[in-house]
Image (cartoon, rainbow, N blue to C red):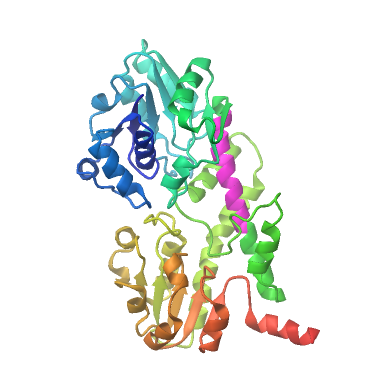
Amino acid sequence: MKVGIIGTGYVGLPTGVGLAELGHDVVCIDKDIAKIKTLQSGKATLYEEGLDELLQKNFSNNKIKFTTSMEEGIKGADVVLLAVGTPPHPVTKEADLQYIFAAAEELAEYLTGYTVVAVKSTVPVGTGDKVETLIKKTNPTADVDIISVPEFLREGYAVKDFFNPDRIVIGSNTERAKKVMAELYSYFADKTEILYVNRRSSETIKYASNAFLAVKIHYINEMANFCEQTGADINEVAKGMGLDKRIGNRFLNAGPGYGGSCFPKDTMAMAYIARQYGVNMSIIENVIKENANRKKQMAHRILETISDIPQARIAVLGLAFKEGTDDCRESPAMDIINELLAHGATITAYDPQAMENAKKILGEKISYAPDAYSATEKADALAILTEWPEFKSLNLNKVSICMKNKNIVDCRNMLNKEQAVALGFNYSCIGYDYHVASKYLKQVA
């Protein structure tokens, strides 16, 4: 099939490369000339494990092309995927749909023959109706069906998730469109469940899923606070909870709060939509508020370790919102660093993939180190903010030599706490307090 994809970001590009690998002829469209030029040279414009190799392979095989021309990308397409951004409105925090509507209006002019236009961007319920109206108004003779195909790709694992999806959701109000999408995703027919629902249900599923996962993250962070006051260990508690199949073990890692391009945006949009419909979503509203507080709490936990050190230097490991990606949008690390800076801290940071994106946000307000050990040189405190696997294997003896004062705030529970304490570090992690635990152990004894 011929597939046009509008948008080459963290959704559009992995999806395009994946569909090309399945044998479809894909044309990716983006208005960013510099980005398209890079892609036309066979190089990925974002970091995802395995993406570069698949991109180069399918680009060389002429299965995927890149263009700034909407006409070139849309003409003759069987399916057009809308994968443009829907950022939060700066005031209301609702999803900003201007890019969706602009793309729909432009593509309508070039529709030829029967075409399925699939909205893959995360959009509020009812957006498909508006896109349909807009396309029909722009091109009244267009033979088109508008459907919803929400993405469930995890940043850092997008390539893996494309080929191993938990489910594929297709929101279509016509049988004709369902048949086209069944052909597009025929590779997955006997590998995963393809769920056909109405368009509005499909639009809601994405928001409902992300909001639920955000709630789960906030819940385990609240339990971590409880554990710190009672002598329990959040890692043991989370493991015990996760063995319950009704709960599951994913998204039970206590930390500095959720971030990224999806959860913050989608929870705020879900809350806004609910208010528009007069629906009380107090759980989501509270999670949004407390997640913001969580990042401030983490910053002040770091500041407490250096409260008696004048002109303290802090080493930060991790800038991306999570491991496996270079994305710093809404990263807890960005908020924590800004809070630290507001209190006069001097910061040197390192991240294996996200340095360039972090510089776009933080600029020269902090220093950037070439590796983890260089970041800790003469530092008074070390803060681990992203769960990159390489941080788990840090040589703490070497870190001890590098640092001026031995304070660690491990916001991702990456390090061996027993080893850190044995080496003389003032070690603080999430969901466990040595002093409290020792007190309770003595009481039991």
Q: Is residue 76 above or below residue 30?
A: above
- Pinpoint residue 222: horizontal percent, then vertical percent: 65, 63
Q: Quadrant of the N terminus?
A: top left
Which of 4 and 308 lies nearest the eye of the viewer? 4
- What residue do we see at 52% from left, 89% from top? 424
Q: Is residue 185 above or below residue 294?
A: above
Which of 263 and 325 lies nearest the eye of the viewer? 325
Q: Residue furthest top?
A: 141
Q: Quadrant of the C terminus?
A: bottom right
Left/right of residue 210 with respect to residue 131 in the rendered view:
right
Q: Is residue 140 above or below residue 61?
A: above
Exactly how many numbered labels are in the figure? 0
Magenta: main secondary structure: helix
Q: Residue furthest right?
A: 444
Which of 155 and 189 lies nearest the eye of the viewer? 189
Left/right of residue 301 with respect to residue 67 in the rendered view:
right
Left/right of residue 379 with respect to residue 280 in the rendered view:
left
Q: Residue furthest front?
A: 190
- Pinpoint residue 177: horizontal percent, then vertical percent: 48, 19
Left/right of residue 370 with respect to residue 260 in the rendered view:
left
- What residue do we see at 71% from left, 54% from top? 244
- Pinpoint residue 163: horizontal percent, then vertical percent: 45, 41
**Residue 91 visible (yes or no):** no
Where does the magenta region start and end? Answer: 201-218
**Residue 327 visible (yes or no):** yes
Which of 392 and 8 lies nearest the eye of the viewer? 392
Q: Quadrant of residue 229?
A: bottom right
Residue 79 falls inside the magenta stretch? no
- Pinpoint residue 277: horizontal percent, then vertical percent: 61, 33
- What residue do we see at 54% from left, 81% from top? 427
- What residue do we see at 55% from left, 36% from top? 192
